[in-house]
Image (cartoon, helix red, strand yellow):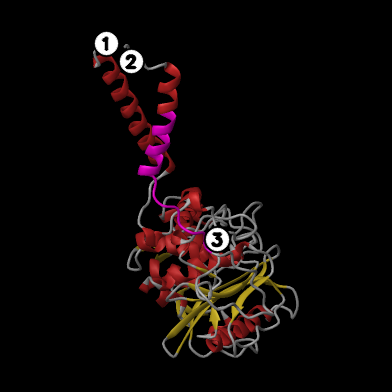
């Protein structure tokens, strides 16, 4: 009797064994996590495993996002187009509204400028200002009074940036940093290195430029990062400094952040430690502010209040700081400023991924789809080859 194996049987065996290979190499599929419901300012967050973890993509939703527990304070009524309040130490975003809405940042973009340039330009360097370093300053720019031909310490120029928001000081520091366009490119790279994806830099001083935008989220990321740099933290907390004058003398300059100084009828905020305010025609009033109280540090960003006049940005930031300190322990985070560890930008609704597409970190690394297919193919192919070999080696008889 002759024993033969048809090609149809071989193909069927291959299919079966490939499937077996997939079962051998593929990890067990985890159970899908329950999908959370929407976060609303007028509802308490649910109990259970979703009570403390930020929901994926919540900060990309429009409107106010907050997850209050019982006894949480009411959010203040704000007119800002976009705002955010976060714990600077943990990075937890306590509440936000339109956090990723791209808006002109005005001089709050100088926070990113300082983050980028400060490490390469320490304060002790002395520099004589050339004529070409002061060209190109936009009309209506805020100026500290940098004079051509005058020698300044870099510390003086940084005081001009942080206290007077001087675009002339920014121009000189950018020239020392490789030039205007080089500095803009480095700022863009710095933003991306921090995970800030909403920011597009075209003018390092924050001057209104078509296409230049940031967001309350990104500016909060920058402010938080700046506070970790001792030089940045010292400059942004400085209330008053002496700036070299044209005639060889000095004159006082005062920080324009009214929450820090208490100027123009704005009461100073207790525990305020910076960071930076701004204003342009397109951006309106913008502010990133940080304060410390009882061992906690909060950072808030307020962009373009649409009611209350030019001082509203300070009062709305004050209200957010008050709320944030009172809300400690009474709200669950709606996101994180640790942008590099955050999830990729999601779709409109935070639904869990299908079980076959992901594995929880707790379950181990799992296997990629390519690895599963490859493993299955190897097992199936090996078995088929073995069957064919056996068929050729088996003796024939009658």
The residue segment tinted magenta is 14-33
Q: Is residue 111 above or below residue 79?
A: above
Is 368 included in the stretch rendered in magenta? no
Q: Nearer the viewer, residue 178 or 193?
A: 193
Label number found at residue 186: none
Quadrant of the image containing the N terminus: top left
Do the CB atoms of the residues marked 3 and 1 lie less than 8 Å apart? no
Query: In the rendered image, which residue does mark 3 sit on?
Result: 205
Query: Quick check: 133 left or right of 75?
Result: left
Q: Nearer the viewer, mark 3 or mark 1?
A: 1
Name the residue at 39% across, 49% down.
Answer: 27
Query: In the rendered image, which residue does mark 2 sit on?
Result: 3
* Residue 189 visible within the image: yes
Q: Earlier in the sequence, mark 2 or mark 3?
A: 2
Measured as percent of width and height from the top left, residue 54 is found at 52, 69
Query: Quick check: 248 left or right of 77?
Result: left
Measured as percent of width and height from the top left, residue 123 is found at 35, 68
Q: Is residue 170 above or below residue 10?
A: below
Do the CB atoms of the residues marked 1 and 2 lie less than 8 Å apart? yes
Measured as percent of width and height from the top left, residue 269 is found at 55, 88
Q: Nearer the viewer, mark 2 or mark 3?
A: 2
């Amino acid at each position: 009797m002759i024993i033969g194996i048809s090609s149809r049987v071989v193909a069927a065996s291959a299919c079966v064994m490939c499937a077996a290979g997939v079962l051998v190499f593929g990890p067990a599929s985890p159970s899908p996590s329950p999908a959370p419901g929407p976060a609303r300012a007028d509802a308490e967050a649910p109990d259970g495993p979703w009570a403390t973890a930020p929901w994926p993509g919540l900060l990309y939703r429009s409107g106010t996002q907050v997850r209050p527990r019982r006894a949480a304070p009411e959010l203040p009524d704000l007119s800002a187009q976009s705002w955010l309040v976060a714990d600077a130490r943990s990075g937890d975003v306590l509440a936000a509204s339109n956090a990723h809405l791209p808006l002109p940042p005005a001089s709050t973009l100088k926070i990113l400028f300082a983050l980028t340039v400060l490490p390469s330009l320490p304060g002790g360097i002395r520099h004589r200002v050339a004529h070409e370093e002061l060209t190109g300053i936009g009309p209506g720019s805020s100026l500290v009074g940098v004079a051509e031909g005058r020698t300044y310490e870099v510390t003086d120029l940084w005081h001009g940036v942080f206290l007077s928001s001087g675009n002339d000081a920014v121009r000189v520091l950018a020239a020392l940093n490789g030039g205007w366009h080089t500095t803009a490119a480095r700022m863009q790279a710095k933003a991306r290195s921090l995970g800030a994806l909403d920011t597009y830099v075209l003018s390092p001083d924050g001057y209104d430029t078509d296409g230049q935008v940031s967001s309350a989220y990104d500016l909060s990321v920058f402010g938080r990062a700046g506070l970790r740099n001792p030089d940045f933290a010292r400059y942004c907390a400085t209330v008053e400094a002496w700036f070299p004058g044209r005639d060889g003398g000095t004159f006082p300059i005062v920080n324009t952040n009214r929450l820090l100084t208490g100027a123009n009828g704005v009461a100073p905020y207790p525990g305020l430690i910076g960071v930076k305010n701004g204003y342009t025609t397109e951006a309106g009033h913008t502010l990133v502010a940080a304060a410390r109280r009882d061992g906690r540090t909060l950072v808030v960003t307020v962009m373009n209040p649409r009611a209350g006049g030019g001082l509203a940005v300070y009062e709305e930031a004050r209200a957010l700081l008050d709320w944030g300190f009172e809300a400690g322990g009474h709200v669950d985070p709606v996101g994180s400023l640790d942008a590099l560890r955050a999830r990729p930008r999601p779709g409109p609704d935070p639904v869990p991924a299908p079980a076959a597409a992901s594995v929880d970190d707790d379950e181990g690394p799992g296997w990629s789809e390519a690895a599963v297919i490859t493993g299955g193919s190897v097992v199936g192919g090996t078995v088929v080859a073995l069957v064919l070999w056996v068929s050729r080696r088996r003796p024939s008889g009658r």
